Image (cartoon, grey):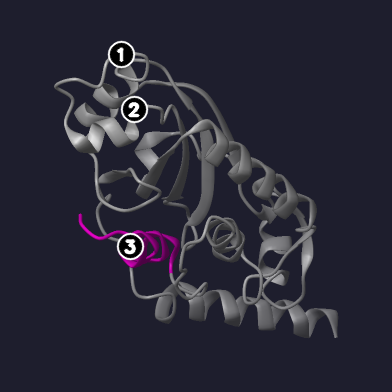
Amino acid sequence: MKRAGIWLGLVAWALLTVAGCGGPDTSPKPSFVSVDNGRGKMSAKQVAASASSANASVQNIPPELQRAADRRYFVEFRSRYALSYGHSFVIFGRVNSAGQVVDREVAGLHPTSYAALPYIVGHVVPVPAETGASDGDLEDAYRSASWRVMLNKAQYDNAVASIRKIQKSSPVWNGMTYNCNAFVASVARSMGYKTPNILLRPQLFMTQLREMNTTSG
C-alpha cells in the first residue's frame, strides 16, 4: 500500500508538472506595486516618493501619492522558480523614506523536509509542513512574479495578525488540496482579495491574483 501511494504521488507530480497548473513558466514578470489597498499600480519611483513624503507637506504631491503618503508597510505576494512547478509565498515588512525594504519576513507553506519523498507523497496524503521561508525565497534571481501592496500601519497590523493566524492553522501540506498557493490564497482572502484556482502554477497563480484585484497594470 505504501509503495502504491508513492507511485500515485509520482503520477500526480508528473501530471501537475507537465500537463496541469496552466502550462510552463515564462520569463520573470514585472514587480507590480499597488496602492489604495490593491487598486491601481505604482512605479518604483512613486513608491520611493510616497515613502519620503510620509512626514512632509502634501502640497504639490500628486493625489495618488497623497493617498499613499503613510504607506510605509507592505505585503508582497510572490512566486519563484523551482525544480518542480515553483513555489508561492508572501513577504511582509516595512520600507524606509527612500522606499527601500528595511524589515521583511517570509510566510509560506511547504513540507518540513527538503527531501523529494515527502514532497511526492504529499501529493497523495497530507505531510507535515512549515510556514516560514524556504531556500531561494528572498533571491530575486528566482522570482517569477510578484505583487506588492503598500499599506498603512493599521492595515499592516491587521494583515500580519491574519498571517500569524493562518500560519498556526496550517500544520500540513498537500499538493492537491492545501498547497503553497492555497496558503497564499488564505492570506489574500483575509485582506479582502479574490483568488484564482490553487492548482495553477505559482507564476500564473500570482499573475491572476494581481489581475483579479487591480483596476490597472
User: What amino acid type is highlighted by mark number 3?
Assistant: Asp
Left or right of 97: which side holds 57?
left
What secondary structure is the magenta-colored segment mainly?
Answer: helix
Find the distance from the CA under tag 1 to the CA under tag 2. 9 Å
Whether tag 1 and tag 2 are in contact, CB under 8 A, the answer is: yes
> Which of pointers 1 and 2 lies earlier in the amino acid sequence?
1
Q: Which residue is mark 1?
A: 56
Q: Is residue 92 above or below residue 122?
A: above
> Which of pointers 2 and 3 lies earlier in the amino acid sequence?
3
Q: Which residues are magenta?
A: 201-217
In the rendered image, which quarter contains the N terminus? bottom right
Q: Which residue is mark 3?
A: 25
Q: Which residue is mark 2?
A: 69
Where is residue 127 drawn, in percent x and y?
78, 64
In this view, the residue in front, 77 or 88, is 77
User: What amino acid type is highlighted by mark number 2?
Assistant: Ala
